[in-house]
Amino acid sequence: MIGLILEQEKAVRQVLGFDRKTTHLIPNWQDLDVMESLDEVLSPLAEFTNILSSEKLVTISSLKPLLHHLKTEVLIRKDLKINDLLDKATFIDPRFRLEYVPDNHVAKIKESILQEAVELTSSERSGVAPLLESPEQPEPSTKKRKLGQILKKKGVTSGDGPLSTRDKAEREIKQYLVCPKIDTEDDPLVWWLQYSSSYPLLSKVAKKYFSICATSKASERLFSISGHIVNSKRTCLKPEKVNMLKFLAKNLDC
C-alpha cells in the first residue's frame, strides 16, 4: 500500500488538490520521508510473506533460510554504518564492552576505536598553539654529576623513550578490557568521569559517542518547548530571545 502511494504520488496530489476539503490530506515532504523509510523496511517482509503464503510451493522448508537471510542480509548488511556505530558505542560502555559485539567484528571495532582515539587527540593538539620553548638551563657547576646528566651527555636515554599516541591508546584499550564491568544500573558517564584520568584517550571517544541520542525524542521535546514559548500572545519574540528562553527552560532544573 505504501509503495503504491509513493508510485502514484503525483496522481494522489492532483486528485486531492481538486477539492478544498481534501487539500489537507496532500502528503508533505515529512510524510513522504516517513513513507519511504517504512517502505524500505517493510518491502522485504512483504516479499517474504508473499513467498511463504503460496499454496503451490513447498514453504515450510524455506522458513528458516528466509529468516536467516532477513537477519544477515537485509537487517544487518543494509545498514553497516549504523551497526558499526552501535558496536563502537557498546564497546565504549563499561557496562557491556564486547558482550554484544559479534566475534567477527571485535578486531575491526578495536582498530576503529584505536584510530578514533588517535585522531581526536591529534585534532585537539593541532587546535592548540604550541607552547613556547623554555630556554636551555645551564648545567650546575657542581663537581658531582648525577646519573641522568652523564647519560644525557653521552646520548643515552633512560627507559624505552616516550610512547606514541597509538601505543598509548592500544595500552588503554587492553587495560580497559581487563578491568571489571560495572552494573547495568550504574551510570557509564559517572564511571568515565571517575576514570578519565586513567584513560585520557578513550574518554575522548566516550564523549563522542555518548553524546548521540538513540531516538529523536530529545529534539521533539525541544520543539515542544518552543511551541509553549512562542504562542499566539508572544509572537514578537526575537529568535535570540527564544533561544535563550529554550535554553533556560531545558536546563533550569538540571
Image: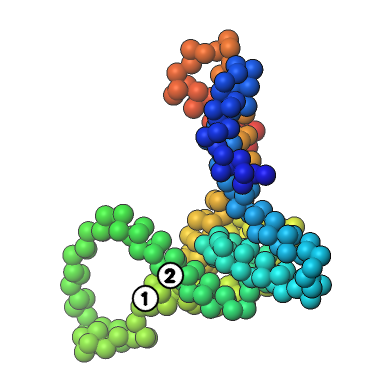
Q: Secondary structure at mark 2?
A: helix
Q: What residue is rendered at 71% in x and 70% in y?
A: 66
Disc with the residue nearer the chain's start (1 vs 2): 2
72 and 64: which one is in front? 64
Display colour scheme: rainbow
Residue 75 position (above or below residue 232)? below
Q: Quadrant of residue 151?
A: bottom left
Q: Quadrant of residue 156?
A: bottom left
- List x then y, in percent, for residue 47: 68, 60
Q: Amino acid at mark 2?
A: Gln
Residue 225 position (above or below residue 175)? above
Q: Residue furthest top?
A: 233
Residue on which the image places disc 2:
115
Q: Amino acid at mark 1?
A: Ser
Which quadrant of the rendered structure holds the C terminus? top right
Q: What residue is rendered at 30% in x and 55% in y?
A: 128
Q: Quadrant of residue 160?
A: bottom left
The residues bearing labels 1 and 2 have C-alpha atoms spaced at a distance of 13 Å
Query: Position of 201 compared to 13: left or right?
Result: left
Query: Position of 194 compared to 170: left or right?
Result: right
- List x then y, in percent, for residue 137: 20, 69
Q: Is residue 34 visible?
A: no
Residue on which the image places disc 1:
164
